[in-house]
Image (spheres, helix red, strand yellow):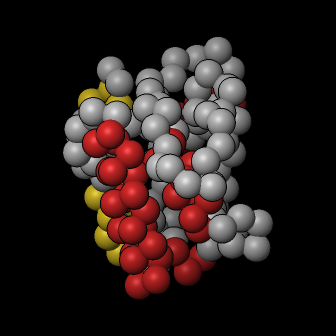
């Protein structure tokens, strides 16, 4: 997925990220386990790093109130980008009724930006990824 700040804010992107998975599970999401299922935010600027860390702190307070565990999401500067094999791409687009191991916690920080949880059953259904800008890519095109 490519973030386009002309279409949405970084804060909104982070809210969607936190609210559409359980960031307290370490190297897993639901029944899926392993390093490929870790929760991570990779930033491209120091400003994004600060906003992501602030956002994590806000969501941790909400998770604490709801008696969830500690957020295990890694936040660090982005490195080289590599595409996964083709069969890993757009699974739910190809398999609309396919397995979705993502579990949402439905916890939101308090404040005026709260909104109702999304209505679709799998938080990743309908998200279409695209190629990142060339400046973020490395490896074969």
- Examine the rendering and report whether any part of residue 78 can be seen: no
Kindly identify the residue that appears in the image at 58 percent across and 26 percent down.
122
Q: Quadrant of residue 34?
A: top left
- Check the image and report above or below for 136 versus 90: below
Q: Where is residue 26? Give x, y as percent.
A: 23, 41
- Check the image and report above or below for 104 versus 141: above
Q: Nearer the viewer, residue 64 or 106?
A: 64
Point out the image quarter for the N terminus: bottom right
Q: Nearer the viewer, residue 82 or 56?
A: 56
Kindly identify the residue that appears in the image at 52 percent across and 18 percent down.
99
Kindly identify the residue that appears in the image at 51 percent across and 71 percent down.
137
- Check the image and report above or below for 132 versus 26: below
- Examine the rendering and report whether any part of residue 93 can be seen: yes
Left or right: 20 as drawn, with respect to 8: left
Q: Nearer the viewer, residue 64 or 55?
A: 64
Kindly identify the residue that appears in the image at 27 percent across and 33 percent down.
67
């Amino acid at each position: 997925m490519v973030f386009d700040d002309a279409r949405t804010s970084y804060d909104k992107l982070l809210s969607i990220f936190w609210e559409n998975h359980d960031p307290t599970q370490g190297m897993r999401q639901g029944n899926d386990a392993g390093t490929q299922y870790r929760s991570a935010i990779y930033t491209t600027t120091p400003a994004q790093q600060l906003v992501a860390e602030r956002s994590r702190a806000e969501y941790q307070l909400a998770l604490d109130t709801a008696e969830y565990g500690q957020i295990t999401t890694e936040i660090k500067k982005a490195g080289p980008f590599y595409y996964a094999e083709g069969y890993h791409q757009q699974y739910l687009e190809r398999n609309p009724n396919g397995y979705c191991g993502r579990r949402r916690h439905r916890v939101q920080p308090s404040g005026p930006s709260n909104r109702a949880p999304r209505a679709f059953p799998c938080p990743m259904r309908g998200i279409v990824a695209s190629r990142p800008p060339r400046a973020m890519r490395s490896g074969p095109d």
